[in-house]
Image (tube, grey):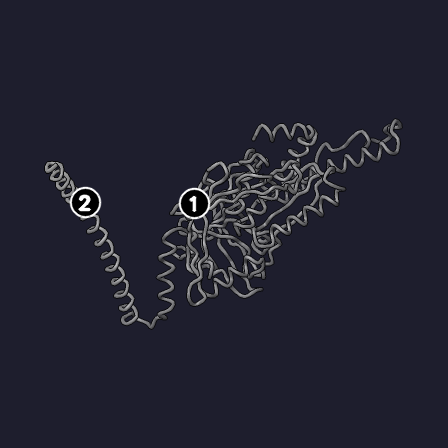
Amino acid sequence: MRKFFLASITGVMFGAVVTTQVAGPLIAQEAARKASVYEQLDLFGDIFERIRSQYVEDVDEGELIEAAINGMLTSLDPHSSYLSPDDAQAMRVQTRGEFGGLGIEVTQEEGFVKVVSPIDGTPADDAGVQAGDFITHVDGESVLGLTLDEAVEMMRGPVGSEIIITVVRDGESEPFDVSIIRDTIKLTAVRSRIEGDTVVLRLTTFSDQTFPSMRDQLAERVEELGGMDSVNGFVLDLRNNPGGLLTQAVRVSDAFLEAGEIVSTRGREPQDGDRFNAEAGDLAKGKPLVVLINGGSASASEIVAGALQDHRRAIVVGTKSFGKGSVQTVMPLRGDGAMRLTTARYYTPSGRSIQALGVSPDIIVEQPRRREAEEEDEPQRNSRTEADLRGSLSNDSLSEDERRQIEEDRARAEKAAKLREDDYQLAYAIDILKGLSALGPEFVKAIADAGN
């Protein structure tokens, strides 16, 4: 018994020694780390005081501190930043769908401003700015070395004023200037139209107007066609849609899914993650769906495309998307400012991260560059037919109804041909839906079942 007691005491003492030997250095390291942080903060205070008292000109202390805060945030990633009270208010206005500016979503790459996408119907879009363009100068002043917020500030100005941006574009040998007149940007979140028997839903942004507007316009176009039985499918056009509200991306995805995960977010800590699931109800009633994306489709657009692709609910057509797979949280700060901080990555239902990779289409379809006006004006050769020949025989084997039907079919074919000239990617998507419609609902259902 005595031996056992002594052994126990020895074990306790040994354990205490081991704990001290292991924990001691760890505690010392943590203390040293904290001391280093406090030393750095003291260093910041010293530098701030020297700038305030010894800089060659008087400085605005508030602006100096804001610049330091913004520098700290922008060093993390391109999407984290400090929002001054004015910037925070402008962002709140933008999510409601109306703001002043050029109408481009931008990021920063290699020190220059890169266009994620122009927004439909805005001054930048009308001036021909394209996704992927690099803006190197604003009114002749270089943006190299500026933060993204500083560069954006240079592009702001009174409505109606002119701005000249210098653009470097892939495929162009030299930089060129683009003149833009600033205007109030009123975002139309959703535009819709009918092409043949197809309903085309064009989503330009994910503001708080997006889902309700899409839902209402979808119903209106279906009714215009005479009911869901007359619809061969839907095209969800997300090209050059830079994203927006995560909640709206979830609702738009849910609109076409009956069940299953839409997107998940994973933060630094496990408890910071979240998961969003679809609820029963498909606005399209199971009709075929094609999603159009390109390099200007980012963030919320990629959530929608990724979710519908993973569930085999849609065929994704176009080119690889932008690849912004991170989530930013806007945190209010004292003084009406705010901090935009990257707090999580998002993942599609299959568990893939889109960050820096983007969504790859099921069918890659490039948008051909538009022909020059001189080429378009060239007369078409060999366009004469038998009917154009003098004295040619008429066709007397057709009734008036048959002739009318032929003319209507020809008009539809000519309209489809014009659409291929104007928007080849959209025409391709509509052709896919025509093919699926011709094969019948049983074939479409079999494809969906096979995918699931």
For residue 8, the mark is none
For residue 417, above or below residue 77: above
Q: In front: 416, or 237? A: 237
- Locate the C terminus and report the quarter of the image it occupies: top right
Q: Quadrant of residue 434?
A: top right
For residue 131, above or below residue 332: above
- Residue type at mark 1: give it: Arg
Q: Residue beneath label 1, please?
A: 266
Secondary structure under the numbered disc 1 in the rendered image: strand
Q: In front: 434, or 133? A: 434
Crowding near pointer 2: few (<14 within 10 Å), some, many (20+)? few
Q: In front: 10, or 322? A: 10
- Locate the N terminus and report the quarter of the image it occupies: top left
Tell me residue 293's x, y (percent): 56, 41
Q: Residue beneath label 2, please?
A: 19
Crowding near pointer 1: few (<14 within 10 Å), some, many (20+)? some
Secondary structure under the numbered disc 2 in the rendered image: helix
- Residue type at mark 2: give it: Thr
Tell me residue 91's x, y (percent): 51, 59
Q: Residue at x 23, y 52 (%)?
A: 30
Whether residue 145 sits left or right of residue 164 in the image: it is left
| Camera-nearest label, 2 or 1 | 2
Q: Check whether the beta carbons of the residues at disc 2 and disc 1 lie within 8 A of each other.
A: no
Looking at the image, which residue sits at the far front? 1
Asked if residue 59 can be seen in this view, the reply is yes
Tell me residue 46's x, y (percent): 25, 66
